[in-house]
Structure formats: C-alpha cells, structure tokens
Amino acid sequence: MPLRSLRALAIAFLLAFLLITIGTGMAIFTATHATIVAQVDKRILSVSDNIAGTQFPARRSQVLARIAEILDERDTGDLGIELEDGEGRRLAGNMAAMHRRLPSGFSTLDTEDGIPGLTDGRALVREIGNGMTLTVIAETEPVDNYNAERLRIYVTGFGAIILLVVVALMLLMRTISRRITALNMTAEAIIDGDLRSRVPTSGVRSEFDEQARIFNRMLDRIGELMAEIGNISNDIAHDLRTPLARLRNQLTQIERQASTPELRAEAAAAIAQGDQLLEMFAAVLRIAEIDAGDRRAGFAPLDLAALAEETGGILQPVAEESDHQIDLTICEAAPVTGDRQLLTQAIHNLIENALRHTPPGTHIALSVTVSGDQALLAVADNGPGIPEDQRERALRRFGRVDKSRTRPGHGLGLPLVDAIARLHRGTLALGDAGPGLVVTMTLPLRD
Amino acid sequence: MDGDLKILLVEDDAALAASLVDELQAFGHAVEVARDGPEALARVGNGYFDAIILDRLLPLLDGISVLERLRREQVTIPIIMLTALARATEKVEGLSAGADDYVAKPVTAAELDARLRALLRGRQWTRASETLRAGDITVSPTKFRAWRSGKAVDLPKVEMDLLIELARNVDSVMTRAMLLERVWGYDFDPKTNIVETYIRRLRVKLMADGGEDPITTVRGVGYALKG
C-alpha cells in the first residue's frame, strides 16, 4: 500500500525507527556482553595456568602452595578457586559446595548455581594431572545485577530518544497539516467566490511561506485576469449598450414620424428586436454581477418557505392568464441566508420558464422542503420536459435545448438561476418529473 | 398637467445626447447638454434647472463626484443617475451619494420623463397619510381602502398597492420598471407579465360596478390613472 497520507507516513517512519533503535540496542548489549565474557575468560585462564604451573602432571604440594598464595592476595577476592582429587574430595579452595557439577572447559554461571554473591559469571574446569581437577570462576559483572541495570539504562536512554523523535514527529506533522489546512481553507474560500482570500504567511523564510507566497501570487494573477475580464465586460456594457440605446432611440423617432402604418410596424418590429438584444445584455451582465460575488455583502437571514409562498401567490394570477395553475406545497419554515431580490428573481425565472415551455392546462408545482441541513426549492411541470442528455446544456449560457421545447427566449433564464444558486453556496439540478421537467434549487439552511 | 421642465443632460456620448434631447423635447422639455463633469458644474452654477440627468461614466470628473459636489453645495434639484453599469452595489453607491433615482442604460425618453415627473411630484407630497383622489376614485393609503363613486371597492393587497401608487401619480405615466420597483420592490425585470396581469385585475375590480376604464395604457411605456 503506498503511503499517501501524512499519518500513514508518520506511523511507518516511527515503526522503522523503533525497529532500528531496538535492533541497535540489542546488538550493543550483546556485543558488550561478549567482550566482557572474553576478558573474564582470559583472566580465569591465566589464574588457572598460574596454579597449574608449567609441569604436567602438576605436583599436589606445589599446586596447594600456589592456591594458598593466590588466595592471600587481596585483589583476588572476586575469584573462586576449587581443587578436588580424583574421588571428588575437596583439597583446597575458597568456595562453598556447588549445586551442580560443572562441565570441563569454559562454562557460564548464573544465580541458579547458588554461589553466594554471584549472579553472572564464568567458570573454567580443567584436569591438571594426578587426578586433580582445578575450577576457577569469576564474575562477569562488576556489580550485582549489572545486566538488569544495563538493560534499564538502555531502555531509559533509547526510550528517551524514541520519545523525543515521537514528539518531534508530531510537531512536524502538526506544522505540515496546519499549513495544508490553511492552503485548503483558502482554496475553499476561492471556490466559494471570495477571490480576495489569501494563504496566511508566518513571516519566516520557510519553504511553507515560500509556497504560500507563490500560491498567493498565483491568486493575485488570477484576480488580475478576472478583473481584466470584469473590466472588459464593463467596457462592453458601456461601449455597446450606449450605441444600442442610440439605435433604439432613433428607431423610436422613426416609428413616431413614420408616414405609413407599414413603416411604423417595421420600426416597431426593429425596436422589439433591439429590446431583445438589450435584454440579453442585461441578463449577461446580471449573471456576471452575481458571479462576482459582491452581493454576498448584502445577504440577510430570510425564510425561503415564506418567500416562495409569497412569490408563488403573486404569480398565480399571471399563470392563470395563460390557463396554467400553480400548486404550492410549502413546508413550515426554511431559514436560509441570502439575497431576497435574487431569490425572488430565481423563483420568477423558474415559473416563467415552466409557463413558457408548457401548453395551457399544465399544472406547475412549486414546493419548498427541508432535508437534513438543506432547503430544496423545486418547480415541476407536467409538460414535455428536457431529455436527459440536454439538461446540462440548458444550464449553460446561450445553451438552448432542442427546438421543439424552445420558444422565444434568450437561453439565459436557467443559467441565471444557476448563478444565483451558486452565489448562495447551493446547486441547481434538472430532473425528470415523469412526465415533465423538475428544476430543484438546493440551498444550505442557516445554522 | 405638469409644467414642462428645464433639464440639464450630462452625457459624453454626443449622438446619444442628441437623440435623447430630441426625444425629451418631444415631451415638451427644454434640454441643455453638458459633455463632462466640470462643464456640468459650471452650467448648474450659471443657470436654473428643474432636474439633472447625470451619466455615471464621464470624462474628467465622474458622475458620482459631480453628484457629491452638487449635494455638498446644497444643490437640491432632483438628479437621475444614468448608467451602463446596472449593478446593485453601484445603485446603492449612487443613491447614497445623493441621487434621487438611478436608471440603467438604455433608457427611453418616456421612462426618463415619467421618472422626472414622479420625482418632482414626490417633493410636493404633504403627508403620506393623505387621502388620494383621482376622478371618481378615492384611496386611503393608511386605511388601505378604496372607493369608486363613493362605493367601496374590495381590493387584495397587491392591487391595492398598485392603485395607491397610480393614485399618487395621478395623470402621469408610471412605467413598468417604476411599478416593479415601487409596488413589488423588485430591482430586476421579471420576465413574467406580472404588471400587465395585475393592471388587468385592478381594472376589472374598479369597473365591476360599471363606469369607464380609469386606467390609460401608454403602449410600450406604462400606465396612468386618469384624474
């Protein structure tokens, strides 16, 4: 499994570190022990050689004399010496009886052997001739329970190192994840439309700050480009709407001064076309205004249910004019935060869309429901609907669907509602009302 | 009924200014044109105007600055701000700088005329609670009731609001945009026939007991309640 997440990476690192540390500790422990054993073996061999002398078989009287001599020396207190004859009788030495018979050659002793004051040691047993067996033992520990002590020191030492590494790793992880969270929060804010949001920097010249600065520079650049596009659309508004207004005024004059009814009708038709063009401009600019997100500043708490009820009620007579019927299914309350004008316009657009695209006699269902932490406003009709493969297009600017559904309209009605939903951090979805079209606007409820 | 007005049009686009001047003159107004901010200030200083139509984007000194300077100098004549940028935030900015009304381009002379007359009339209101009269129709905005030839007419809320607005501006045209703003409080143009529908309903109610149609339709412009 690839280590993708920060946590998995940290845990893997910690495990590897733990294994290596414990391995190293054990290796050092074993190596020092082996060294000590080798040293002690050398010492008992030399003492044993001294006692046995150079002759073989050794003479008993000489051996006894040398043992006595060695035992008299002060610094041999930690040595144990034992001399036995062929029948196992003790001839000389300074040790109490052993619990077991030691094997010939070097062997290891421990507390089991019941030698007073000895917890860990080495023994050398050898035949020195004339049936005599010489045993020399020495402790491998400078103090009692030295190994246990050594283990404790190791555990404390290496434990401290491991603890330090764990703490350091956690701090590192926290720093990294805090930076990543800051970056994510900025990105989320940008997605939400707050283009002024930037990644905070700590002021220290770190890689993180460098990354934040580069990220912020990228956002600045995007902001500049967006502003340029905004300026272009403002320029278009100014540069194209003014001549259009001029054109319309001239046409109005022509209409007024027209000498024949035919000419007047022609002029009126031209004015109507000009108005449609201007209407399209207004819709495009309105969408641009909404997308810019400035209107969030004017957001206020409102009840979507009450707003839909009121707007649906106002539109009922309008629907009746074209022999349509609006059926309201509105829940108790749907508190949201938003722009009353825009949400009203969204409801108008959705109802108007349904009125325009369905034949007389059609029922239009306007409903507001609450589901989880979301408010759902839906407008459904039992008209011809929009085929599934064309629904996405219906939400695009100028993305008009199949001619059969399309009557006069600029194809900006649903994109405008979509922009309004986005501004409110919501979504707009087209679905099948079976038969007919259902357009659902989902907005987050106010907490 | 209103006297013709002397208007200062501040607009840098010569051709648009010329066509608006022609149109406004057709409504009986006398129009002078200023091409930029400083010229507008100079003309206001040197002459008398009933109203000013001020473009927002102007050379040398922009419309908002001209507006602010005029208001600082205690010039109280009605000012309609004209703009190609119909953004809500800019509208608020324009109104708080002291504009009486804010209209998006393109605007017809009929719309401007209707708004100018409404503005000038609005200043003559004595009290909001005043009972309004238009021909044989009487409206009480405070009691929220209406009578025709002394007989009470039962009106639902929207129709009542509509009648009050028309009665306040009796004999002058209220455009569709003005009614949407004032009766419904909409700052957008709903694509629905909402104004037409409610005018029709109001007419039916007002004419339920006979009598002629008290509302005049001005085609392509708006509606007026006859006085």
Image (cartoon, grey):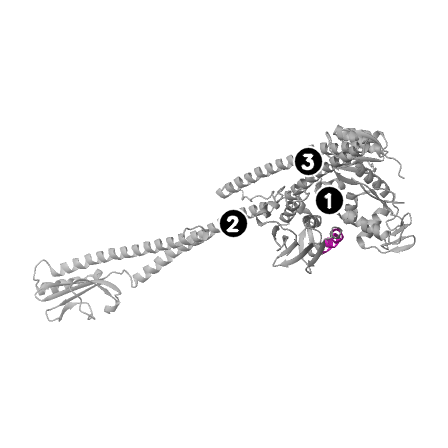
Instruction: Check whether the beta carbons of the residues at disc 1 and disc 2 lie within 8 A of each other.
Output: no
Q: Are marks 2 and 3 on the same chain?
A: yes
Q: Nearer the viewer, mark 1 or mark 2?
A: 1
The residue labelled by disc 3 is: A237
Q: The disc numbered 2 marks a residue on which chain?
A: A
Looking at the picture, tell me which residue is in the foreground, A262 or A133.
A262
Please state the horizontal and vertical placement of residue B201, each as a whole percent of the image.
81, 51
Residue A326 visible to the viewer: yes
Secondary element at tag 1: loop
The correct choice, above or below, for A53 with respect to B50 in the image is below
The stretch in magenta equals A309-318
Residue type at tag 2: Arg
Quarter of the image containing the C terminus of chain B?
top right
Tell me, for residue B24, which label it has, or none: none
The residue labelled by disc 2 is: A178
* CA–CA distance in space, label 3 to label 1: 18 Å
Quarter of the image containing the N terminus of chain B?
top right
Q: How many residues crowd mark 3 within 10 Å: few (<14), some (14–19), many (20+)?
A: many
Residue type at tag 3: Ala
Tell me, for residue B189, which label it has, or none: 1
Looking at the picture, tell me which residue is in the foreground, A42 or B128.
B128
Q: The disc numbered 1 marks a residue on which chain?
A: B
* CA–CA distance in space, label 2 to label 3: 44 Å
Residue type at tag 1: Asp
Q: Are marks 1 and 2 on the same chain?
A: no
